[in-house]
Image (tube, grey):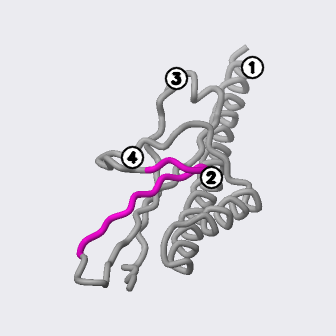
Amino acid sequence: MRDAFGGIVNISFIVVFMVIVNGYMAFAASYNKAFRYKNKIINIIEQNEGFDDVAKEKIHAYRISLGYSLNADINVDGATECIQEDGYCYSKTIPSTTGEVSKEYYTVTTAVNIDIPILNKFLPNMHIFQVNGTTKTITKH
């Protein structure tokens, strides 16, 4: 009987280890998607010299090709004017305006999608994993 109990304990350790490793791998893949999505959004905004309808369409097309999805809104700590879009949030900052020249930059935030049913039951409001980035200063004449 002692050997049977030892076998059950060993199997339970193996199962717990497998769950932890698989959870880590799933998180790493989701974080990678969020990071790539954020970088592409920043590149598109910089190429278009601002956020407009063309940039919005390019971002949406990239999100579909990447397979990035987010079930909940992004709650950014400290951001008062964060505009929610298609799986991301951005805010525009205008540090200075001199005559006809205006300078601005954008802050972009994406979130890591953690959609694990068991984890969601224990931690329903787990939206703490976010990826932030800012564009270079965009000068408009």
How far is disc 4 from disc 2 in space, using C-alphas? 18 Å
Label 2: state its secondary structure.
Answer: helix
The residue singled out by tag 4 in the image is 76
Label 3: state its secondary structure.
Answer: helix
Task: Specify whether residue 84 is painted magenta.
Answer: yes
Q: Nearer the viewer, mark 4 or mark 2?
A: 4
Q: Earlier in the sequence, mark 4 or mark 1?
A: 1
Q: Earlier in the sequence, mark 3 or mark 1?
A: 1
Q: Nearer the viewer, mark 4 or mark 3?
A: 4
Residue ranking furthest to the top: 1
How far is disc 2 from disc 3 in space, using C-alphas? 20 Å
- The image shows residue 20 at horizontal and vertical percentages of 61, 41
How far is disc 1 from disc 2 in space, using C-alphas? 39 Å
Q: Nearer the viewer, mark 3 or mark 1?
A: 3
Q: Residues within 10 Å of mark 4 (few under 14, many from 20)?
A: some
Q: Nearer the viewer, mark 1 or mark 2?
A: 2
Depth check: 85 or 67 in front?
Answer: 85
Left or right: where does residue 1 sit relative to residue 103? Answer: right
The residue singled out by tag 3 in the image is 122
Residue at 68% over, 53% down: 68
Q: Type of residue at label 2?
A: Ser
Residue ranking furthest to the front: 100
**Numbered marks: total:** 4
What is the quadrant of residue 104 in the picture? bottom left
Residue 35 is labelled as none
The range drawn in magenta is 83-96
- The image shows residue 27 at horizontal and vertical percentages of 60, 49
The residue singled out by tag 2 in the image is 30
Q: Type of residue at label 4?
A: Val
Residue at 52% over, 49% down: 111
The residue singled out by tag 1 in the image is 4
